[in-house]
Amino acid sequence: MPITEPEIKAAQQKLDAHVREMIAWHFSPETGCPYWLDWAKKNFDPRKEVNSFADLIAKFSHFQDESLRDMQPEVWVPAKFKGRPFNIFETGGTTGMPKQRIGWDDYKTDYEEFSGKISDAHFPRGAAWLMVGPTGPRRLRLAIEHLANYRSSSCYFVDLDPRWVKKVISAKQFDQARAYMNHVVEQGVTLLKHRKIAGLFTTPKLLEALAEKVNLYEAGIRGVFCGGTTMAPQYVRFIVEEVLEGRIGFYPTYGNTLMGLAASVPLLPEDKFSITYYAPQPRAVLRVVNPQQASQLVGYGEWGRVELTTLTKEFFMPRFLERDEAIRRAPREPYAWDGVAEVRPFGAMEKNIVEGVY
């Protein structure tokens, strides 16, 4: 069933109401954080001028994420959360001081919501998971473990350091990169051979490498939850038909520390293996904008730069221009808002992008 105009309108009204609630929260001295309260003193009081998402787009400029690196994390603590220890998560960067986002329970909310979008047949409740990917200071490690636990499961981990991978590839030390990838894959294969595991989270490149060493279905894997690097349609087809042999559930996602998790809609024949992701609106909103005029949306089916607005009590971030580009897609059941498709690094067609195994 296609999404109807009344459904789209209802979703917009829900988003506008959520915007008003989040603006009141982040710009009230009783609840807001020092960063945004100080910002309001220097600029304007959004509580008086922002009553809808359209107002937010019109009134706020693009968020500059350097402040997540340059400022102490305490400036982001909402007054209501003062005194509560917070998690510190890294986001992006390969050298120097990383950008960081703090948090408490957002990752739990995001991944509990995502749990309702994966099948018990592919991720049996109580059956073990394996994560082969970036752990360490990244939100993803806690999020994947929480998702497994939420589904009455436990999770094994093999760590990957994407900063090191990008560093050696940028330095053209390809032998080191291959050796490190083999090191990571060997650990994953050992666990798959010696432990009963049904669910797997990893990146597309690592998934491909694991499948070269072990038959995933015969090893017990029934569902794969994937995120990380670019997946063009031809590569998606290769993963679905060759790597997973059409026997294992495949759940591609688009997410990061600043947004949370955007789920993909199930692939239909007419999609021709082009994956579309939908943000967890109203907690986060994705738009695809004209790179030369970022106040303008591109048309459906057109490429543009991804713009993210995050709207939770823990974190407010308006109109951040992601380092990604995508195709704008129309609402599609069950989502009554725009999606983003075939996400890839911004400017991927014009320059070489280092993604490595991540």
Image (cartoon, grey):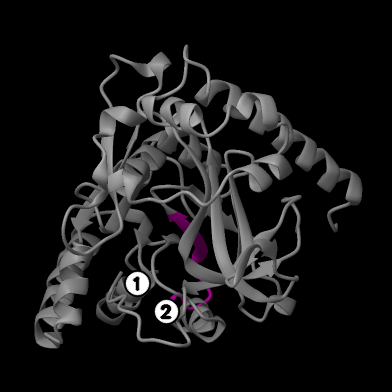
Relative to the observer, which residue lies in front, 19 or 260?
19
Label number found at residue 51:
none
Mark 1 — residue? 207
- Secondary structure under badge 2? helix
Mark 2 — residue? 243
Residue 11 vs residue 31: left or right? right
Residue 232 vs residue 72: left or right? right
- Amino acid tagged 2: Val
Q: Quadrant of residue 7?
A: top right
Q: Position of residue 354 (x, y in %)?
A: 30, 78
Q: CA distance from mark 2 to mark 1?
A: 8 Å
Q: Position of residue 317 (x, y in %)?
A: 49, 42
Q: In this rendering, is residue 178 above or below 37?
A: below
Relative to the observer, which residue lies in front, 245 or 253?
253
Q: Residue at x 47, y 15 (%)?
A: 29
Does the magenta segment cover residue 209?
A: no
Q: In this rendering, is residue 244 above or below 309?
A: below
Residue 210 vs residue 269: left or right? left
CB under 8 Å between callouts 2 and 1?
A: yes
Relative to the observer, which residue lies in front, 241 or 312?
312
Q: Residue at x 36, y 42 (%)?
A: 143
Using the rendered image of the protein, determine whether residue 202 is visible from the camera's viewpoint. Answer: yes
